[in-house]
Image: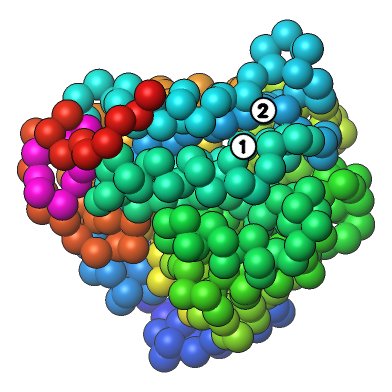
């Protein structure tokens, strides 16, 4: 921890005192931290908070991502994953059989969580997704199904002609236990209007998460940063998440996602290209930890950050690296240079080399047995524990 004198010299003495006392930071405090050129000083405050919350633990999960379709009606400007029509080269929509089969294509790795997200397909009905979840849970009862962003939930409701609460209730009955945090992007309407005008707005996104929380479903939240948004937009976004959490309390983790420019139609003005540096990413992760005092975990998503920056982020407020993933399309279509998959020893090594203690967790951050072979009773072994037939 840097000294009080150092923060005093930076003009951050009041913020330093608040962080040490565990008091909530204001938006003005957040703006001053973003403006501080000493990234290490900001990071040290975030590290103090993450250490108070989770000690030297760094979490990871054995998970399997499945992207069921890239056909999407929304056409967000930043999205390199989406295809407009099924006839387009590279467009795909997995059948229920193929989705369930993906669980078996895990290279012998047992896992705890299945993360299912996709584009807003114009024709797939809610019954299709209920069926998928029932089949996954029937075949692998121990897997936690974490699926569908709030944007997808709102889309299902529109296609079905029912409310988002009804969609969530039906999916929960089918076996849904958790929702990922995608689709939040940046809540500020003037930014949303430019980068994702057809997508759920902030009110709808937050309402769906509040409804999920009211049903007992835990959810994650995200912030896509490093594009056309301002620092004020980032702080507004974090403030809205914090206020929603005060009301409904079901956010487990926040995942700050850096915008990857490579294959996106959203091109940044030349004068802004140099702004979104590695230091900006680390500072933003630190601000997430400092502002979101009511959300327990901050994730350094290695797919989007890259391995090295994810490791560094553990010193800037993050306490979770996500997991094995196995196959990932959205970030890699956007230009992520990271691997597709991580092994359990690989995750352990990333964490221990960074000076933290690896803790393997389930979807809800409960620790599960640590075993470098991956053979633990809490995880699903797709060979041994499989009950029914994935087609
Ligand atoms: S970000 Fe999601 S909603 Fe937007 S176009 Fe891509 S897949 Fe569709």
Q: Quadrant of residue 63?
A: top left
Mark 1 lies within 8 Å of ligand 1 (Cβ measured): yes
Q: Is residue 94 left or right of residue 79?
A: left
Q: Nearer the viewer, residue 222 or 120?
A: 120
Question: Could you tell me which secondary element the residue under label 2 belongs to?
Answer: loop
Quarter of the image for the C terminus: give it: top left
At a point 60% along the width and 85% down the height, the residue shown is 247
One can see residue 388 in this view: yes
Please give left or right for residue 171 compared with residue 205 in the image: left
Question: To which residue does mark 2 refer?
Answer: 70
Above or below residue 288? Residue 192 is above
Q: Is residue 376 magenta?
A: yes
Q: What residue is shown with label 1?
A: 118
Picture quarter with the N terminus:
bottom left
Left or right: residue 29 compared with residue 107: right
Q: Give the range drawn in magenta.
A: 374-382
Mark 2, ligand 1, within 8 Å: the answer is: yes
- Magenta portion: prevailing SS class: loop
Q: Where is residue 69 in the image (x, y as percent from the top left)?
A: 63, 29
Report the Cα–Cα distance between label 2 and label 1.
6 Å
């Amino acid at each position: 921890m840097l000294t009080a004198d150092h923060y005093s010299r930076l003009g951050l003495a009041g913020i330093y005192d608040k962080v040490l006392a565990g008091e909530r930071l204001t938006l003005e405090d957040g703006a001053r931290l973003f403006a501080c050129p000493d990234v290490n000083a900001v990071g040290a405050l975030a590290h103090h908070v993450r250490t108070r919350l989770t000690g030297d633990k760094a979490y990871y999960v054995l998970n399997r991502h499945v992207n069921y379709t890239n056909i999407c009606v929304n056409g967000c400007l930043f999205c390199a994953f989406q295809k407009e029509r099924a006839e387009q080269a590279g467009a795909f929509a997995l059948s229920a059989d193929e989705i369930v089969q993906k669980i078996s294509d895990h290279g012998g790795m047992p896992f705890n969580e299945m993360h299912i997200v996709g584009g807003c397909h114009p024709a797939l009905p809610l019954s299709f997704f209920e069926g998928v979840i029932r089949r996954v849970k029937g075949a692998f009862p121990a897997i936690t199904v974490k699926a569908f962003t709030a944007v997808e939930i709102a889309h299902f409701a529109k296609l079905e002609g029912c409310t988002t609460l009804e969609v969530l209730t039906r999916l929960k009955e089918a076996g849904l236990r958790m929702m990922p945090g995608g689709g939040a992007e940046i809540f500020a309407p003037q930014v949303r209007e430019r980068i994702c005008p057809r997508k759920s707005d902030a009110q709808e996104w937050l309402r769906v998460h509040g409804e999920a929380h009211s049903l007992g479903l835990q959810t994650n939240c995200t912030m896509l940063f490093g594009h056309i948004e301002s620092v004020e937009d980032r702080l507004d976004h974090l403030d809205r998440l914090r206020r929603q959490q005060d009301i409904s309390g079901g956010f487990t983790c926040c995942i700050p996602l850096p915008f990857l420019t490579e294959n996106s139609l959203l091109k940044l003005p030349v004068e802004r290209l140099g702004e979104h540096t590695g230091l900006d990413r680390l500072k933003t992760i630190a601000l997430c930890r400092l502002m979101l005092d009511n959300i327990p975990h901050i994730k350094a998503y290695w797919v989007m950050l890259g391995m090295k920056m994810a490791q560094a982020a553990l010193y800037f407020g993050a306490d979770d690296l996500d997991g094995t993933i196995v196959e990932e399309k959205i970030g890699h279509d956007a230009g992520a240079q990271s691997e597709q998959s991580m092994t359990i020893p690989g995750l352990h090594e990333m964490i221990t080399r960074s000076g933290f203690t690896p803790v393997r967790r389930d979807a809800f951050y409960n620790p599960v047995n640590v075993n470098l072979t991956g053979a633990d009773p809490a995880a699903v072994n797709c060979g041994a524990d499989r009950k029914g037939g994935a087609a």
